[in-house]
């Protein structure tokens, strides 16, 4: 019986380079009295704006956040579309209205317009503002990751990743 010879599999090679960042920055927001109230994974200005009252909408399914506040009263507001129920949160220190939700079980919060201010992102918060202007910081080190991928059809696929960095920067670590 003759042997059936299959053509060799098609080998595809690809090379991708991307910049590697060690950590994603967190944004700290403070109440007007100086109490830290919100930690967010993106800038508040980039979040959608609610046209009815100018509040910023933080969707917990898309963004990571941590609140530092106390529960306040539940308020009913009459709007043209009907009555809106707000579960409000206030500052622990001064009692200023900061956030509200429509449903306490969902992870969507609204940040009241003008209630929070952005702090410094270095983790020291307001203490750096008391020390004066910040000193010059070191330039950010860029680390490039090169991904080499070999795809050999249904038989196998191999991925090799390498990290490239300048030799001087590697020796410093």
Image (cartoon, rainbow, N blue to C red):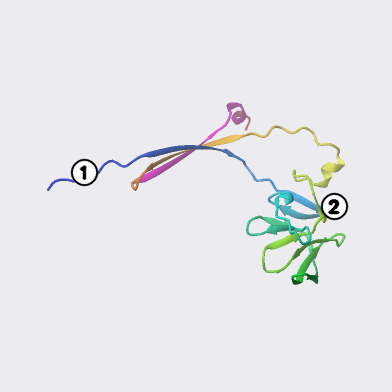
Identity of the residue drawn at 50% across and 38% down = 16
Q: Is residue 167 magenta?
A: yes
Indicate whether 110 appears above or below 153. Answer: below
Position of residue 43 measured from the top left corner of the image (x, y, whole percent): 72, 49
Which residue is pictured at 63% across the width and 59% down the height?
Answer: 61
Residue 12's image quarter? top left
Residue that label 1 marks? 5
The residue drawn where x is 75% and y is 55% is 38
Q: Position of residue 41 (x, y in %)?
A: 68, 51
Any magenta on residue 41?
A: no
Question: Residue lying farthest top?
Answer: 168
Which residue carries the number 2 mark?
34
> Helix, strand or loop at disc 1?
loop
| SS state under label 2 | loop
Characterize the local packing of mark 2: few (<14), some (14-19) or many (20 or more) Cα atoms within 10 angstroms: some
Nearer the camera: disc 1 or disc 2 = 1
User: Which image quarter holds the C terminus?
Assistant: top right
Identify the residue at horizontal 33%, vertical 46% (top origin): 155
Indicate which disc residue 62 carries: none
Q: Which residues are magenta?
A: 156-170
- Give the image location of residue 84, x and y in percent: 76, 70
Q: Which of the 4 image quadrants contains residue 57?
A: bottom right
Give how far across and how far down residue 14 sits, in percent.
44, 38
Foreground residue, 37 or 97? 97
> Which is more N-terminal, label 2 or label 1?
1
In the depicted structure, whether residue 33 falls above or below residue 89:
above
Q: Magenta segment, principal secondary structure?
A: strand
Mark 1 → mark 2, Cα distance in angstroms = 76 Å
User: Looking at this rendering, what residue extends furthest in the left direction?
Assistant: 1
User: Number of marks in the image?
Assistant: 2
Q: Residue furthest front?
A: 80
| Label 1 CA crowd tier, 10 Å (few <14, some 14–19, many 20+) | few
């Amino acid at each position: 019986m003759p042997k059936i010879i299959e053509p060799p599999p098609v080998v595809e090679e690809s090379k991708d380079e991307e910049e590697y960042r060690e950590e994603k920055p967190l944004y700290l927001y403070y109440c007007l009295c100086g109490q830290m109230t919100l930690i967010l994974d993106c800038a508040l200005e980039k979040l959608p704006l609610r046209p009815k009252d100018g509040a910023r909408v933080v969707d917990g399914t898309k963004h990571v956040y941590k609140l530092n506040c106390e529960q306040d009263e539940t308020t009913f507001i009459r709007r043209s579309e009907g009555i809106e129920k707000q579960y409000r949160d206030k500052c622990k220190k001064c009692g200023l209205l900061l956030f509200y939700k429509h449903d306490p079980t969902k992870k969507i919060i609204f940040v009241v317009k003008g209630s929070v201010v952005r702090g410094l992102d270095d983790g020291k918060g307001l203490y750096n503002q008391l020390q004066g202007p910040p000193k010059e910081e070191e330039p950010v080190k860029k680390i490039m990751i090169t991904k080499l991928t070999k795809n050999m059809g249904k038989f196998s696929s191999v991925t090799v990743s390498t990290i490239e960095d300048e030799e001087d920067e590697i020796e410093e670590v």
